[in-house]
Amino acid sequence: MKRFFVLFLAVVTSVGVLAADFELRILSYPKEVPQGAPMWVTAEIRNVSGHAITVCNGGPNSFVYALKVRRADGRLRQGCPPPTLAKLAPYFGTKELPADWKDVRRQDLSCRYAANANQTEEPGELVVEFTLTSAGPCPKGNSQGGDEYHTWTGAISAPEVRIELMKPSGVDMQAYKAFTGFPLSNSEKLLTRFPTSTYAGYALAENTVAFSDQPFFWLDDPEGNILSYYRTPDGRIGVTKAHIEAEKATMATFAQLAGPFLETHPDFIYAPLIRRMYAMCLGLTGDIPGAMNQISILAKGQGKEADEAKAYLKKKASAKTGN
């Protein structure tokens, strides 16, 4: 499994446009990203009309929104998959979107999994578009002609955003060449051979390590919380001791990789998530002081992980003083 995330030099301010009924916003995107790395863009569409809206759900006039990317120089993106569209459901008819309806999309717009593995995208400026279209009328049934539904019709575009696809250098170039332009095609080998490359940060952030996403309070009683996770309704532990030890070994390996990377790249855009996972892996494998140190570092920053760290440390301090 892979984690979705916001990448290198991502902006946190959203870009949006407000129409009478819907608002489209690009919430986050990387301003710069090296060749062969993920290029995750997060966008949101929201009903801001204050009332429910009926839209066409299926057929050529369907309510469709999409994230698309093109090269600013007008050249075709070689070897890249076509953009995907988001439709509400694969059937004909209508759909009522409540007044509070919204949808958030996260899409990797890179070519790191291009169909032609010998073809990687050249550096240059990329332009990202987020659009909504819904033409009318909306036919009743899976056919053209006949009765029609009265549904929302319109077209909205959020302001374009631009991403610079950069040529890698130094150890990143070594990793890029070693994997023929696709350094994340084998994360295990990448982390072994180039553990301090920028690409290693993407591999770490996409990793799914057992229990690393659990709340910080698990560190108050690591063994007890792990056992409780596997405890069955009749009080038995549903896995073997060897299984738990294997998961701890995986967490220890992650910690061994994450520590040196964070020392080399403390300002990597996805460092907060990696550091949070690192703290949990340390604490759940017996290094509580090391875990608390990482949580303290997290608390000095900004964002979701920092807020969680601050809340946990505040609760620990209150419990210690009895307040």
Image (cartoon, helix red, strand yellow):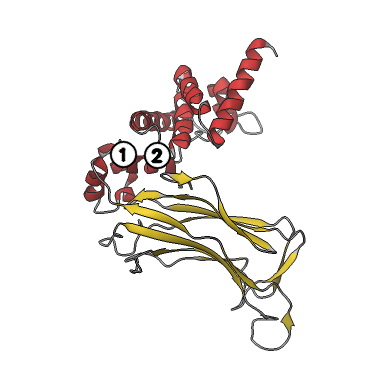
Mark 2 surroundings: few (<14), some (14-19) or many (≥20) residues within 10 A: many
Marks 1 and 2 close (CB-CB < 8 Å): yes
- Secondary structure of residue under mark 2: helix
| Kind of residue at disc 2 | Leu
Three-letter amino acid code of the residue under disc 1: Leu
**Which residue, given by chain and number where applicable, does mark 1 sit on?**
191
Q: Which picture quadrant has residue 89?
A: bottom right
The mark found on residue 204 in the picture is: 2
Q: Pointer 1: residues within 10 angstroms few (<14), some, or many (20+)?
A: many
Q: Where is residue 44 in the image (x, y as percent from the top left)?
A: 59, 55
Please indicate whether residue 201 sits to the left or right of residue 276 in the image: left
Query: Which disc is residue 39 wearing?
Result: none
Residue at 44% in and 25% down: 282
Which of the pair 255/275 is nearer the observer?
275
Q: Residue 112: x, y in percent?
A: 35, 56
Identify the residue at image location x=77%, y=61%.
51
Q: Does residue 215 appear anywhere in the picture?
A: no
Residue 114 percent location from the top left of the image? 34, 61
The quadrant the C terminus occupies is top right
Q: How far apart are marks 1 and 2 (CA)?
A: 8 Å
Viewer-nearest residue: 193 or 322: 322
* Residue 118 visible from this viewpoint: yes
Tell me the residue at 44%/39% (across/down). Answer: 270
Residue 276: image x %, image y %? 49, 32
Residue farthest toward the top in the current orientation of the protein: 321
Circle nearer the N terminus (1, 2): 1
User: Is 287 situated above or below 263?
Assistant: above
For residue 48, which quarter of the picture?
Answer: bottom right
| Relative horizontal placement of residue 151, taking residue 199 as reference (left or right) | right
